[in-house]
Image (cartoon, rainbow, N blue to C red):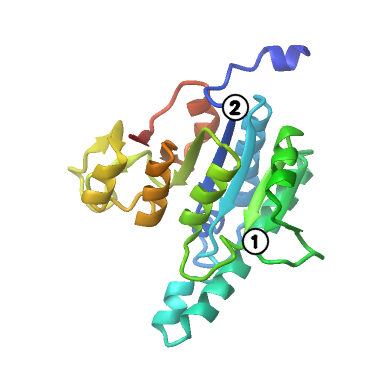
Amino acid sequence: MSDASADQPKAAYKRVLLKISGEALMGDQGFGLHPPTVQRIAREVKSVRDMGVEICMVIGGGNIFRGLQGSAQGMERTTADYMGMLATVMNALAMQSALEGMGVFSRVISAIRMDEVAEPYIRRRAVRHLEKKRVCIFAAGTGNPYFTTDTAATLRANEMACEAIFKGTKVDGVYDKDPEKHTDAVRYDDITYDDVLVKNLKVMDASAIALARDNDLPIIVFSLDEPGGFRGILAGEGTYTIVHG
């Protein structure tokens, strides 16, 4: 073992899925991609990969196009959702470019076939990539309309036998109300799946929470804006909320 790897703390999990929104990639802009922000998140992913953790990712598409908003403006829902799926592919390619610029091998794996830009989703092949310490970035959701990228993340995490989902947000956990609007908001250190559903806490959509609950897959909600936060939690530090049974 090299000296560098010997210095790394032992990670709490061996294989995890990182779920981030498309909006996380746009920085302070109101739309699109902010390359320095993409680079910053890629560095966070690399620091965790360097601990020996196997990582897969699901990135939303809301910074480019959101299917629900499109349908609300009169667009046919299925078409709008497919457009949202294509937006996630653009974000995945941006993340892949940033990671590979740092020497981290990665694969964009799409639920919609587009062989010139991404691999098709084949579970056993994706697992093999993870075993080889490549970062797998799952794009195009589940490949079906009416399902969010939250549900896609929970589905892929289960299929990949991940030990936890890390949900990167703007706040450092799950609160009883929006902490950006209410100064008296209270953060939970841990909370059950059922409480999240009953209290409608907007951690992830209801189908994603139910799928995680039914497969006993913990969801760790943390701040993506906290430098080193992702790595810190895996090293047993930091502030976060864990959603579990």
Q: Residue at x 65, y 43 (%)?
A: 42
Percent coordinates x, y for residue 72 in the rendering: 39, 81
Q: Residues within 10 Å of mark 2 (few under 14, many from 20)?
A: some
- Closer to the camera, 149 or 93? 149
Percent coordinates x, y for residue 230 in the rendering: 52, 34
Residue occupying the far left of the picture: 184
Vertically, is 149 above or below 203?
below
Q: Which residue is mark 2?
A: 14
- For the residues labelled 2 and 1, the Cα–Cα distance comes to 25 Å
What numbered label is drawn on residue 111?
1
What numbered label is drawn on residue 166?
none
Quadrant of the rendered structure where residue 53 is?
top right
Q: Secondary structure at mark 2?
A: loop
- Position of the C terminus, as image quadrant, is top left
Quadrant of the rendered structure where residue 9 is?
top right
- Closer to the camera, 215 or 113? 215
> In the image, what residue type sits under mark 2?
Lys
Residue occupying the far bottom of the picture: 74
Residue 225 appears in view: no
Q: Residues within 10 Å of mark 1 (few under 14, many from 20)?
A: many
Q: Is residue 8 left or right of residue 22?
A: right
Disc with the residue nearer the chain's start (2 vs 1): 2
Residue 188 appears in view: yes
> In the image, what residue type sits under mark 1?
Ala
